Amino acid sequence: MNQDIHIPALARVEGEGALTIRLKDGVINEILLNIYEPPRFFEGFLHGRYFQDVPDITARICGICPVAYQMSSVQALEAALQVTISPEVRQLRQLLYCAEYIESHALHIYLLQGPDLVNQESALSLAAEAPELVKQGLRLKKIGNDLLKTIGGRSVHPVNTCVGGFYRWPDEQAIHGLVPELEWARQASIDTVKWAATLNYPDFEQDYEFVALNRIDDYAIYDGDILSSKGKRITPQDFEKHYTETHVERSNALHSHTVDNSTYFVGPLARINLNYKKLRQIAKETAREIGLKLPLRNPYKSLLARAIELVHTSDLAIELANAYHPQGPSHVEFDIQPGEGCGVSEAPRGLLYHRYIVDEQGMIRFARITPPTAQNFAQMEADLWALAPSVIKQPQEEASLSFEHLLRSYDPCISCATHFLKLHIDSE
Amino acid sequence: MNQFPNGAKDEPSSIIKIIGIGQSLRGDDAAGLAAVRFWQERYQANIERPNLQVELEELPGIGLLSLLEGSSIAILVDTVHSNSIPGTIHLLSNDQLEAFTGGASSAHGWGVAETLLLGEKLMPLSMPEKIILIGIEAGNFSLGESLSPQVELALPEVARLIEQLTIRV
């Protein structure tokens, strides 16, 4: 090239998020949080598509949690088509979900939120300061991605999941061959919890209503009923009766509230607070070792909850991988019939709800996708209002960072969080 | 129109990875994927070369580092946004990539440039000796499956460039 070119940013522009805080006479007058939200597009895009294409299409909503979109969609479609999967398929789906938790949590802990809590501008500057720490995070993430690839065929957007099971069983030896790395991951996760316990978390607690999946026999990730910290327990079929979405004029994202018009909080804090007793023994032992006290009401401590879930999911993954001996068909055969069904699972960043109506040809006639980031949206705004008085007097750059740190602790969906965040403070 | 970045080594046995990056449902953001597929179709004979490996990934993020492993030379094909005319083809080597990160002081812009910088910092020995980026200027990032006409028209030229690079390096 014979002249320099200036390209301010590579593509991946998806995720324009913006925060505007308006002051009037030195007092906060308005807080506007705007996050671009792709699932709404997908709801329309799915209309008229063949049901079996849905898992792979919805997986493309997010580069970090494609498995969650697949798991909620296949469960919804299996309910609509009255398909019952085998126990072996359920276990393999749980293992696939473990892979996603490992890669997603490692990314958020070490590369997204972690730098905020050690006063680093970014993972790049953290890597200069503490390269071994970031390397540990990258290796953890890679182990998750390798497991994802072994089961799903690809390390980012898996393509093996189908309504009724999996297109094919992953190679048994390949799954077993990952166990030594998963054992390393389990120890690294324990170390991660101990490191996370040493961090300085901002002093900020709110009285949240936590909502997460719950099972009697298990730490619910793949499926379960929906439990609230206010004591309400409902089945997935009743989700839309109790949690509603409304359009807010200033935003292109829908805002979720409980039917009583309260905000609520989904994600790792909700899961840990509601389901702590169901964690794997080794995760509970690690939590006890650091003196974890529940409930956690500080959103920044989501990082701690994620670290404990890393221990849980890597330990569970070892058990499921060792027990993997595929037998029989990898998916069930079934007749197409019209129907309606919903499915809900715990994406790494919180509860993910899908509902579909399928016609007699197997075509999608209606799709509803309620992602965790949208459910937390109103809660994030409420938190900004609570935080704003203490930071608004800081210099603009410092204030911007404080707001960013808070929002980042929610781990908003990466497709929503990329290139986050532009701050505008308007004074009148 | 293009000059090849300096430094590509003549090692016929080394692994060359051609990595198409993008999002297939975000308009022109699919250009990197589309261009690599176009090259595969048009120059099919050459993709049988054992030292050539092709990867197509949507939003690989940090996972790009894993994709690069084991290659001596990587040719990345991705969409770029620089206020040039849509369809403009940019050819850059990794020592020029830093220019791409302008304004990306955000911890979260895990685009190609930031990921490569992290890789160089943490695992320099695992990185390819040479990384070449073919950037395709995008015009339209709205949701949907189709490329804008100017970007569509650039695909044969990008495919020709990929082919030349795979032969040359």
Image: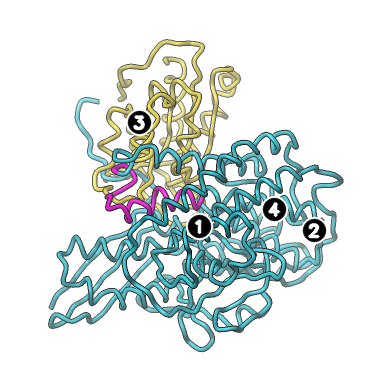
Measured as percent of width and height from the top left, residue A330 is found at 80, 47
For the residue labelled by badge 3, is the local secondary structure a helix, a strand or a loop?
helix
Tell me the magenta residue range. Answer: A104-125
Amino acid under label 2? Ile
| Residue at the spot 55% in from the left edge and 43% down from the top edge | A185
Give the residue number, with chain letter if any, for mark 2.
A85
Which callout, 1 or 3, points to the residue nearer the camera?
A: 1
Amino acid under label 4? Arg
Which callout, 1 or 2, points to the residue nearer the camera?
A: 1
Q: Residues within 10 Å of mark 4 (few under 14, many from 20)?
A: many
Mark 4 vs 2: CB contact within 8 A: yes
Mark 1 vs 3: CB contact within 8 A: no
Residue under mark 1: which chain is it in?
Answer: A
Q: Identify the image quadrant of residue A126.
A: top left
Q: Which mark is residue A93?
A: 4
Q: Which mark is residue B120?
A: 3
Measured as percent of width and height from the top left, residue A381 is found at 36, 75
Q: Colour of chain B?
A: yellow
Instruction: Work out whether residue A40 can be spotted.
Output: no
| Residue at the spot 80% in from the left edge and 42% down from the top edge | A325
Q: Residues within 10 Å of mark 2 (few under 14, many from 20)?
A: some
